[in-house]
Image: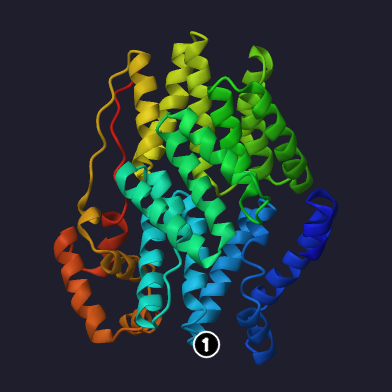
């Protein structure tokens, strides 16, 4: 960590990766001795941003899952909200917004019950991707005011990054550019590279090619040093925004190929959206429809409304009719009901669910009765089908 601050990203990537691998090995070993748990619970802040900093989605998933497990097994209620928030952040990038919302709600409830301050980090990013502008802006502005008073500079940058995501999704690139520029003032650990990608898209779409090119140089240094599928995919997509026709085409295809081999669903859908927009502007309508339809289906299914609307507008411009997505009965579940339903679907008993959520087995049973009624099912074995998210319908081209 010290080397990263002193020597910047590229020279320290190997050391960071070794450190990350050691932590992952400790978690995978299934060890339960107090020394290892003590190490994680005491220094829980340090591992959290390392996987995103290295663009390592597999490590992020493993470490987040392990952090939640350790916090639950030890009953560490002071640590659990941070672990849940960490896991929720992964779910957002994996396109699992409902799962992220459930974890955020649980983290908030625990923090408030303990008299602490809820952690708003992932809520900011989730709200930006969902693109319900008034709610997202209110949350961002409130957070900026609160964390500014507490001197939490990293969260200020995260709020600006979330603002850039929100307005890039809504196609208001000047506003996104201003927010992304503020987000990139400091090289905050874990998401500075993400903010650079937002800056590149906003600047390219605002006609600020020099600004975009400068940001691309910084992003390329980081993604090249990382070398993961996620990193290389984001880099190729960002480079495509600033490239000539033939090179851009190849770069968009490269981005989709890389991102298709990682867990970061939102960026794969975004690469397809950008490629589809580019194809349409080059009068390649049939090809553009394929990419835009795929992006629209994913963004609609996961609830990324701003980007979904961008894709819908582009599809309409190609002459394709686009139906609005349908909302299933799952949307009627409360956050706690949704969490209980998913745990029951995954085979957990009432006692196991109760222990995980710090409620009684009788309360779990009561919630399951309400869940079955809302979903129109009679038993647990029907939950998997009932919880499958509906896909939007689009007629064939």
Q: Where is residue 163 in the image (x, y as percent from the top left)?
A: 46, 43
Where 247 sits versus 14, above or below?
above
Residue 222 lies in quadrant: top right
Q: Where is residue 372 in the image (x, y as percent from the top left)?
A: 18, 66
Is residue 88 visible in this depiction of the protein?
Answer: no
**Is residue 2 left or right of 303 when viewed as pictured?**
right
Where 199 sits versus 225, above or below?
above
Q: Position of residue 72 (x, y in %)?
A: 48, 81
Colour scheme employed for the rendering of this structure: rainbow
Between 103 and 26, the one lying in front of the other is 103
Residue ranking furthest to the bottom: 34
- Classify the position of the N terminus by image quarter: bottom right
Between 54 and 249, the one lying in front of the other is 54
- Residue at (54%, 30%) from the top-left corner? 202
Residue 346 lies in quadrant: bottom left
Q: Where is residue 309 in the image (x, y as percent from the top left)?
A: 35, 31
**Is residue 384 left or right of 32 when viewed as pictured?**
left
Looking at the rendered structure, the secondary structure element under dot 1 is helix
Between 357 and 179, the one lying in front of the other is 179
- Residue at (65%, 91%) from the top-left corner? 34
Where 315 sits versus 185, above or below?
above
């Amino acid at each position: 960590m010290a080397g990263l601050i002193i020597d910047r990203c590229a020279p320290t990537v190997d050391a960071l990766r070794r450190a990350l691998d050691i932590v992952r090995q400790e978690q995978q070993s299934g060890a339960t001795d107090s020394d290892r748990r003590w190490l994680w619970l005491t220094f829980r802040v340090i591992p959290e941003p390392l996987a995103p900093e290295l663009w390592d989605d597999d490590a992020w998933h493993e470490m987040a899952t392990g952090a939640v497990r350790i916090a639950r097994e030890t009953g560490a209620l002071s640590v659990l909200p941070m672990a849940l928030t960490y896991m929720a952040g992964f779910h957002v990038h994996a396109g699992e917004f409902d799962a992220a919302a459930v974890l955020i709600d649980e983290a908030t409830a625990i923090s408030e019950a303990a008299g602490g301050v809820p952690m708003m980090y992932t809520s900011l990013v989730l709200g930006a991707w969902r693109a319900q502008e008034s709610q997202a802006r209110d949350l961002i502005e409130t957070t900026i005011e609160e964390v500014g008073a507490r001197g939490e500079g990293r969260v200020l940058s995260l709020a600006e990054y979330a603002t850039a995501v929100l307005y890039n999704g809504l196609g208001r690139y000047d506003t996104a550019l201003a927010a992304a520029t503020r987000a990139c003032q400091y090289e905050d650990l874990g998401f500075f590279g993400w903010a650079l990608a937002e800056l590149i898209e906003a600047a390219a779409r605002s006609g600020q090619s020099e600004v975009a090119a400068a940001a691309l140089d910084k992003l390329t240094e980081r993604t090249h040093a990382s070398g993961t599928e996620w990193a290389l995919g984001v880099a190729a997509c960002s480079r495509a925004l600033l490239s000539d026709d033939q090179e851009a085409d190849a770069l968009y295809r490269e981005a989709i190929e890389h991102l298709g081999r990682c867990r970061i669903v939102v960026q794969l859908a975004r690469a397809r959206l950008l490629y589809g927009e580019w194809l349409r502007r080059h009068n390649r309508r049939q090809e553009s429809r394929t990419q835009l339809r795929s992006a629209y289906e994913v963004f609609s299914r996961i609830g990324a409304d701003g980007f979904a609307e961008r894709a819908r507008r582009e599809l309409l411009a190609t002459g394709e009719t686009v139906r609005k997505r349908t909302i299933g009965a799952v949307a009627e579940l409360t956050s706690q009901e949704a969490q209980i339903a998913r745990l029951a679907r995954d085979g957990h008993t009432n006692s196991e669910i109760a222990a995980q959520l710090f409620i009684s087995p009788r309360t779990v049973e009561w919630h399951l009765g309400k869940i079955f009624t809302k979903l129109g099912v009679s038993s647990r074995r029907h939950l998997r089908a009932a919880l499958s998210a509906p896909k939007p319908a689009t007629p064939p081209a």
